[in-house]
Structures are given as C-alpha cells and as structure tokens.
C-alpha cells in the first residue's frame, strides 16, 4: 500500500533551506557504496528480527519487510540494476536507497524499519560484513596459490636449483624448497587476515547514533543472524571504529609484498639469461614491434599492484588520524580506498593458475646448482666433521675456491694433492661429501632443504592448505575463532 509520507532526506525535518546542488552531488556516497547492497539488506533483515522480538513490528510486518528486502537485493543485483542504483537521482547513500525502495514496495511499514537505529551503526555493520566476506575470498585465493606452489613442488621432485643471497649464487636447494618459501608467506598472510576477521567479528547493530539504541532491543538477535560472534561492547567505539578497514588493508599489503617478490623472481628466472622457467603463453603478451618477444605482463602487474594496496592503507591511516569520537563524515572517505582493492581475490586466482602453468627448466636449474662453488659450505662442513674449527675450515675452503677459480674448475675438479695444500684433512671421502645430493642432505634440520625434510614440509603444507577450505574458513570467520 502507498505510504502517507514519502521520505526525502533522512534528516530533513530540522532544515528549511535545500542543499546546494553541487555540494549535494559531491557528498553523495551511493556512487561507490552501492557495493554494500547485499550487506545492507542482510543487516536490515536482522534489525527487523530484533524489532519484531521487541514488539515494534508484527510477525506479518517482519515477513513482508524481509521479503521486500530480498526483492531489492535480487532486482538490483544485476549489472543493469547496479547501474540504476548508482545513478539514482535522490538517494544519498546505500541506506537511503534501500529505504526509498522499501517504502515504494511496502509503504509505511518501510518507514518503521528505521526505528531504533542510525545510519552510523548501519554503515559500521555493512562495512564489517563486507570486509569479512572479502577476507574469505582473499584467504581462498591464498589457499589456491599455495596449493599451486605445492603442486609444482611435488612435480619438481628431487630437482635442484641455486639459492641466492645478494642476488649471488649461495647454496643449492631443492626447487620444492624454494617454492615452499612462498607457501609459508601465503599461509602467514591467510593467518593475519583470519585474525583480522576474528577481531572485527562483532555486531554494531543496536549502537544507535553514538550512545546506544533508545529501545530495549535484544542485540544478540541481529548479531546471531548475521553470523557475528557477539554485539560490540561499546556504542561509541562501534559507530566510530574503522581500524578493521586499516588492519585489513595492511594485511593485504603483506599479500601484495609477497606476490611482488614472487613476481620479481619469476620475471628474472624467465629471462634468457637465467632460463629457469618458461612463462605460460596464456598469461603473457607479445611486442607490437619485436616479433620474438614474450613479455611477463602478469608478473609485472603483480609487482605494481602492491603500490595501489599500500596507497589505500596509507590513505585510510591519514583519514582516521586525529578524528575525535565518535562518527565523523571523514569516515566516508575510508570506503573508496577499501573498495579500490577489490581486485585482490581475482589477482590471487590468476596467480594461482599462472603458477600451476609454469614450466621449469630443471636441467638448466640443476646445472646452475652444480656450478659456481655452491658446495663450498658443504666443503667447510666436511672439514668440521674432521675436527677443524669452522672459522679455520671456512678459511681453508675459501683459499681452495680461489685456487679452483684460477684453475678454471669446480671444487670437485681439484685433486687431493691440490686440496691438501690448504689442509691435510682432505681425503678421498671429500668428493661424495660435496656431491649435489650430499650438499642438499647435509641441511638435515627442521626447515632445511634435505630431501626428506622437504618431503615432510610438502605434506605439512598440504594439511594447512586443506584447513583453509571454504567451509573451515567460513567457520573460523563466523565463530571469531
């Protein structure tokens, strides 16, 4: 039935003069907060349940409101609907838009829904729901990338490659061990974000504008319906808190940093000079001028995206700095930086598929792992087992390396007689001790690159990734665990 009072501005009763037209357009947030439609609908339905329990709405009115809210989500969830919502001539923000649509559908019952609540608590709730959902998507993407890395590690088997410090060859490691380094980063990133989700998982509904609802609402009803752990503990904090946005963006910065490091290594390893990896054609482009080129566009964009993520975090930090309690319009400016990083889940899905499609040149990586005196540390360890103090062993092997460089051979190319110039401890058992497999397996500690250690690390990583499946992520987030 039609409403007797068509809502204009949600706050217009006190004002006589209309807003300046340019200012009105400039301050509207519907042009970007339309992304919160599903969360505004969910929060409004939860508030209706609380109003029903408090006797403000009848069960019939509540059912009618909930059905109408579902209809709004359905009708405006399409591309055409979203465009219509963004271009709405009257709505100030997503909350105003939903109220206007609701009154259009159910009349005066729609006006009753705002009883006992404020836009300050609405936006705080919507943003928590949005960030929580985004965390689920990002963690799912991190799990997919980690799984692709583990898959490549298993396929690599016993293949070895050089590790690097200062971009100089250091020691040989298993290819799987190198890949597992990025798995560890991805798992830490997921853990940080799930920790953020647990911290934000409290429901602001019932906080009112600043001092709490003016009706005896059971706040646990809305919190429970929305999957929050509990209601927020302080109405002032709940309506003015946006640190969860900053924490989320900072968490994404770590994701971007780790992806950028991976992207840089793959970009280097894909060059002719390294030749360790063949870039997948499905994720590369060519040159408009040079027919032979295959450019690493995906990895270059990965390197660049971290700048946008960090920029968003920095913007929010500056927006929140020095704000007095409680709500201030400044907080509206935290939304666009948050929405600007909505590309991260897709980016992770792309890098997971890219990683799975990489083809490693194991022969070339293996040859590189056996040249350049990468077994010098193993040689020093050999002398340590002969009772030589490590500092002395280091000196002896360093001199042997310099001699081998002058002779143009690797350490294993020196004869025992030549080696004994630098230490009488060298014997025939020196050569098997510095062979590639022995050099790898001498790192037989937790976290080392020994074959058996890496096999166990792959299994352990698979278990952790399995724990990040969709069901368990949702359970962890919604339970605040």
Image: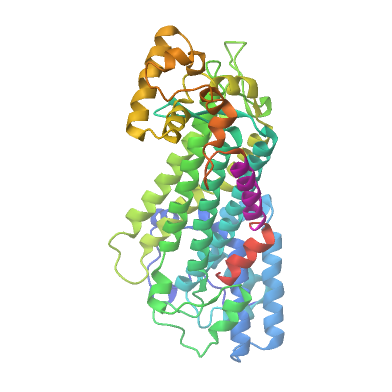
The percent position of residue 447, horizontal first and vertical second, equals 52, 45
Q: Residue at x 65, y 45 (%)?
A: 147
In the rendered view, tell whether residue 165 sits above or below residue 3.
above
Camera-side residue of 328 and 249: 249
| Residue 361 appears anywhere in the view | no
The percent position of residue 11, horizontal first and vertical second, equals 44, 73
In the rendered view, tell whether residue 476 sits above or below residue 275.
below
Camera-side residue of 153 and 307: 153
Residue 356 lies in the magenta stretch: no
In the rendered view, tell whether residue 447 sits above or below residue 403.
below
Q: Quadrant of the N terminus?
A: bottom right
* Residue 298 image-quadrant placement: top right
* Residue 24 image-quadrant placement: bottom left
What predominant SS class does the magenta segment belong to? Answer: helix
The percent position of residue 243, horizontal first and vertical second, equals 40, 62
* Residue 387 image-quadrant placement: top left
Camera-side residue of 205 and 429: 429
In the rendered view, tell whether residue 385 sits above or below residue 40.
above
Camera-side residue of 151 and 244: 151
Residue 466 lies in the magenta stretch: yes
The percent position of residue 248, horizontal first and vertical second, equals 47, 56
- 235 left or right of 76 in image: left
Which span of residues is magenta-colored? 452-467
Q: Residue at x 67, y 57 (%)?
A: 469
Residue that extends furthest to the top in the rendered view of this protein: 407
| Picture mark count | 0
Q: Residue at x 36, y 60 (%)?
A: 330
Q: Quadrant of the C terminus?
A: bottom right
């Amino acid at each position: 039935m039609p409403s007797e009072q068509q809502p204009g501005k949600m706050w217009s009763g006190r004002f006589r003069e209309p807003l300046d037209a340019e200012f009105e357009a400039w301050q509207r947030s519907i042009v970007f907060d339309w992304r919160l439609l599903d969360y505004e609908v969910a929060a409004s339905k939860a508030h209706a349940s609380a109003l029903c329990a408090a006797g403000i709405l009848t069960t019939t009115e509540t059912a009618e409101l909930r059905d109408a809210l579902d209809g709004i989500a359905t009708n405006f969830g399409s591309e055409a609907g979203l465009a219509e919502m963004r271009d709405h001539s009257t709505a100030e923000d997503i909350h105003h838009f939903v109220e206007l649509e609701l009154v259009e559908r159910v009349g005066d019952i729609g006006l009753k829904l705002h009883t006992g609540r404020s836009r300050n608590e609405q936006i705080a709730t919507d943003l928590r729901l949005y960030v929580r959902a985004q965390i689920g998507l990002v963690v799912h993407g991190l799990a997919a990338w980690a799984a692709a890395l583990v898959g490549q590690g298993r396929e690599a088997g016993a293949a070895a490659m050089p590790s690097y410090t200062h971009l100089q060859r250091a020691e040989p490691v298993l290819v799987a061990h190198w890949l597992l380094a990025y798995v560890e980063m991805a798992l830490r990133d997921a853990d940080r974000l799930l920790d953020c989700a647990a911290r934000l998982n409290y429901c602001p509904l019932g906080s009112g504008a600043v001092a709490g609802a003016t009706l005896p609402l059971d706040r646990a009803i809305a919190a429970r319906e929305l999957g929050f752990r509990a209601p927020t503990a302080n109405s002032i904090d709940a309506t003015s808190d946006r640190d969860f946005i900053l924490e989320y963006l900072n968490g994404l910065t770590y994701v971007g940093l780790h992806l950028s490091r991976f992207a840089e290594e793959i970009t280097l390893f894909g060059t002719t000079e390294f030749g360790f990896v063949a870039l997948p054609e499905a994720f590369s482009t060519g040159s408009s001028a040079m027919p032979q080129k295959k450019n690493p566009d995906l990895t270059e964009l990965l390197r660049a995206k971290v700048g946008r993520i960090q920029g968003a975090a920095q913007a929010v930090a500056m927006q929140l700095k020095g704000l007095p309690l409680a709500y201030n319009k400044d907080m509206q400016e935290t939304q666009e930086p948050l929405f600007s990083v909505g590309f991260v889940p897709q980016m992770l899905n792309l890098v997971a598929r890219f990683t799975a499609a990489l083809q490693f040149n194991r022969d070339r990586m293996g040859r590189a792992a056996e040249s350049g005196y990468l077994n010098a540390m193993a040689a020093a360890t050999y002398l340590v087992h002969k009772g030589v103090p490590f500092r002395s062993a280091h000196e002896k092997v360093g001199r042997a390396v310099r001699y081998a460089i002058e002779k143009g051979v690797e350490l294993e190319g020196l004869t025992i007689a030549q080696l004994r110039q630098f230490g009488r401890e060298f014997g025939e058992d020196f050569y098997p001790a510095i062979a590639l497999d022995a050099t790898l397996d001498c790192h037989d500690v937790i976290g080392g690159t020994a074959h058996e250690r890496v096999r166990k690390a792959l299994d352990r990583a698979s278990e952790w990734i399995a724990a990040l499946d969709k069901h368990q992520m949702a359970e962890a987030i919604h339970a605040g665990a």
